[in-house]
Amino acid sequence: MSNQVKFLTKNFGQYDTSSIGSYMDIGGFEALRKAVTMDPEKICDMITEVKVRGRGGAEYPLGRKWSQARAVVGENKIVVCNADEGETTTFKDRELIQKDPFNLIEALIIAGYVCGATDGYIYMRAEYACLRPLLLNAIRQAKNYGFLGENILGKGFDFNLHLYSGGGAYVCGEGTALIRSIEGKAGRPRMKPPFIKVSGLFARPTCLNNVESLSIVPHLLVDKGRVYASCGSGESIGTKMISVAGNVNNPGVFEIPFGTTVREIIYNLAGGIQHDREIQLIQFGGASGKIADASILDTPYTYDDLRNAGVMVGSGGILVIDERTSVIDFLRMNQEFFSEESCGQCTPCREGNLHIKIILDKIASHTATQEDIRIMATIARVMSMSSLCGLGETAQNTLQSAMLTFPEVFEVGGTES
């Protein structure tokens, strides 16, 4: 377990998550007290200095996002926390909510201060309903202690926080679909522009962030020893929460310094492969993530190294599949998910997912032709270029990467090893 670090997770198990007093006893809300004495742009600069990228999958620099949100002209701005966490094999945000809820509340208040917002919204996936009482209690206590409401800490800063639960749709992890869901509309993406930062929730300027992205900020503000900046490798500074699942002995959530190798993650932290079987494939970043074979094991877990290896950090999920599952069967399972979760609004995604599912079934039954394979590759490419939202654009990442990594599987008349 030597590869684990405790920066975001340092509060885990250290306080009673139902008591704001217990949180304050370990230094809770000191980051907020410091933040409201600072120029908001200085906070953005601090985040930019350590190159924090969005942890939801898009990897957009957090300091830049907050600075841009602050620069938007408009009244009654909003910050939104995306706690939908709909990517399969991704459950690190759940850990942050469950084991450190007051830190998330503090982070949202700081985000509101920096962005000039008056309201914050937490959009939590329906399956996390068991965590609603925990967050509602944290919000209520924060308000009772004067950390929410009017004139927070006597600084003339007003901010209120609201909790919403989704309906269980994967597509609501996409920003515009999430916003429409909060508004009481069907959770379907909309065209951009206008961009969320200009016209988002209730047509008000909105800054949308992932749970992990937000959770970093309070820790950074009180990081006197620059622990975060001392971790990492190259352009990937700091630590990352990852979720490891699949055919491993010790699945779970781990906080690692960037630069830890994939082998160390799977064999040290996750305890290796069940019954010492061979790895068939590894998927990075959830259902919309790309896959690799065992040759990636010695690749450092950083943004640049993983991208150069043909995959990406994405949501932080790592799914390990052993030799018992064929590549095609895995792709069929993945495709079944997207065929079900597509909202059906745009033609490339609605029809593309359906037809790729049909062709994968033909490959599995050994009835596919070379023309089927060509058509499937074309549909995947068109989807990635012309779908309305990120679901359609990334739904075929797994298939496209599989065609590069396991070309023999897609040879008509060939067999899987």
Image (spheres, rainbow, N blue to C red):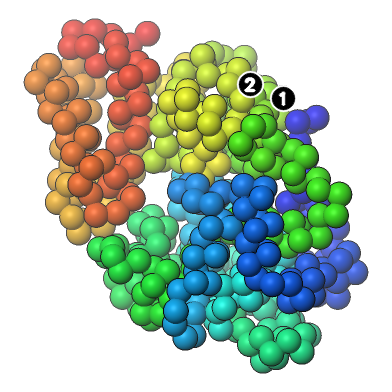
Q: Amino acid at mark 2?
A: Arg
In the image, what residue occupies the spot 56% across and 83% down? Answer: 118
Q: Write down the residue under mark 1.
A: 268
Where 193 falls versus 389 (above or below)? Answer: below
Determine if residue 155 is in view: yes
Where 237 falls versus 15 (above or below)? Answer: above
Residue 274 locus on image (x, y percent): 61, 22
| Residue 266 or residue 118, whichever sits in front | 118
In the image, what residue occupies the spot 18% across and 16% down? Answer: 366
**Quadrant, the C terminus:** top left
Q: Residue furthest right?
A: 25
Q: Residue 263 has which mark?
A: 2
Element under disc 1 = helix
Quick one: label 2, few (<14), some, or many (20+) residues within 10 Å? some
Residue 353 locus on image (x, y percent): 22, 42
Q: Amino acid at mark 1?
A: Asn
User: Whole-Å distance between the Cαs marked 2 and 1?
Assistant: 8 Å
| Residue 32 or residue 130, whichever sits in front | 32
In the image, what residue occupies the spot 11% across and 17% down? Answer: 369
Element under disc 2 = helix
Residue 176 locus on image (x, y percent): 35, 65
Determine if residue 108 is in view: no
Is there CB contact under 8 Å for labels 2 and 1?
yes
Where 241 falls versus 329 (above or below)? Answer: below
Q: Residue 7 has which mark?
A: none
Residue 115 locus on image (x, y percent): 56, 73
User: Where is residue 159, by image quadrant?
Assistant: bottom right
From the image, state whether disc 2 or disc 1 is nearer to you.
Answer: 2
**Quadrant, the N terminus:** top right
User: Where is residue 231, by image quadrant?
Assistant: top right
Where 340 falls versus 334 (above or below)? Answer: below
| Residue 145 or residue 245, whichever sits in front | 145
